[in-house]
Image: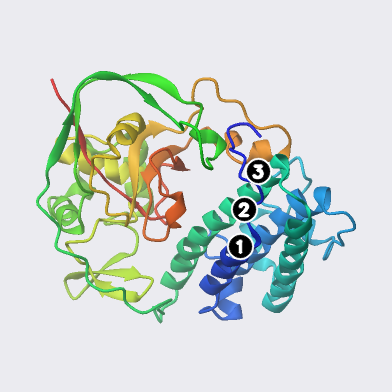
Amino acid sequence: MHALQAHGLGGLDRLRAIRARTEALAAPLSPEDQTVQSMPDASPTKWHLAHTTWFFETFVLRPHAAGYAVFDPAYEYLFNSYYEAVGPRHPRPQRGLITRPGVEEVMAYRRHVTDAMATLLSTAGTASTLGDIVELGLQHEQQHQELILMDIKHALSLNPLRPAYRLPSGKAPKACPLAWREFEAALVEIGHEGGGFVFDNEGPRHRIWLDAFALAMRPVTCGEYLEFIEDGGYRRPEFWLSAGWDCVNQRGWQAPLYWEQCDGRWKIFTLSGLESVDPSRPVCHVSAYEANAFAKWKGKRLPREAEWELAASAIDDSGEVWEWTASPYVAYPGYREPPGAIGEYNGKFMANQTVLRGGCAATPRGHVRSTYRNFFPPDARWMFGGIRLAEDLR
């Protein structure tokens, strides 16, 4: 498989641990919580539980497990996400209308597939091609663990009761003064070097010229972003890209997503419910347009993804927020999509998206690496997107 490293079969214990983690994330939620879809870009928790199961059934068990019995043929249509080569699928904006199968049936589906995977892993040996697709399935499920938290946060935020998903996580450490790390102009290499799992879009490794630049040693905080708001940042078009200014006016943006004013003070909806904005925490749930506007207001800019990757080992990353870059999501030189339906995993989305780097508090730790390329449309705000500043050195 192009750009994927052979991992063997990864181990039955790891499979069960990742599958159990997904179910643990869903455990605090009622069946009603797990069925609702709050917007077209988000998916119900129940759908995530089923789709990650569909992935193993479709790409591992059906082609590789002799005698495997499909749990329900209708699920091939219901829980396909975007794999056109597999066949037709239920429209994404209507996933919340799938009230049946219910949560119990979906959990039975998960048990059926997990047990079949366990049988396959215990008997199939260590064929690298099978190992690659199993590893991709595990990494894919971990991506959906983050999506579960992103999507349920959005759904709960629309509930007038402001319900909490979990208990408060505690106050963030006080933010250190903003410092900068300078980097000289150089011809550098970015992209995956080999060894260990990577998604196909993380390579090939290639050279790129970078002029001298400086990168902030930490992300922008809520306190710093409040200064932008209080200085009329959302009312001053000179800071905004044209498409961003259209969003401000058409959607009524006045602050990051989940921020609201209560009795003259800013509050923020979190997975722990409504809380006061903590000025020490990295600002979160801003679009690329807001990140760019803030950077321009500060007289700085957003980093290019090659700059971010070069600097990753030297900067202080809080790990709380993904960080917007100024780079469009495009293929690296020499990139080729993997053959077959799996080739639709990343490559088909290389248009009208912007790259984010790093990771966030909801990201599985194994997914936080310097070459990881997350991507969303520049107006997206419901994922955990934040800001790190950069500047040119002359």
**Label 2: how many Cα within 10 Å (few below 14, some 14–19, many 20+):** some
SS at badge 3: helix
Whether residue 3 sits left or right of residue 296 in the image: it is right
Question: Marks 3 and 2: which is nearer the front?
Answer: 2
Question: Marks 3 and 1: which is nearer the front?
Answer: 3
The residue positioned 53% from the left and 59% from the top of the image is 42
Q: In which quadrant of the rendered image does the C terminus lie?
A: top left
Kind of residue sitting beneath label 1? His
Q: Residue furthest left?
A: 177
Q: CA distance from mark 3 to mark 2?
A: 9 Å
SS at badge 2: loop
Q: From the top left corner, tell me how far across and down residue 391 is, in percent.
A: 18, 31
Q: Earlier in the sequence, mark 2 or mark 1?
A: 2
Q: Earlier in the sequence, mark 3 or mark 1?
A: 1
Circle 3 residue: 132
Q: From the top left corner, tell me how far across and down residue 32 is, in percent.
A: 59, 78
Whether the residues at callouts 2 and 1 have beta carbons within 8 Å, the answer is no
The residue lying toward the viewer, choosing from 188 and 34, is 188
Circle 1 residue: 48
The residue lying toward the viewer, choosing from 278 and 121, is 121
Whether residue 113 sits left or right of residue 353 in the image: it is right
Q: From the top left corner, tell me how far across and down residue 265 is, in percent.
A: 17, 71
Q: CA distance from mark 3 to mark 1?
A: 22 Å
Above or below, comparing residue 332 to residue 230 in the picture? above
Question: Marks 2 and 1: which is nearer the front?
Answer: 2
Above or below, comparing residue 161 to residue 44 in the picture? below
Total labels: the figure holds: 3
Circle 2 residue: 10
Q: CA distance from mark 2 to mark 1?
A: 22 Å
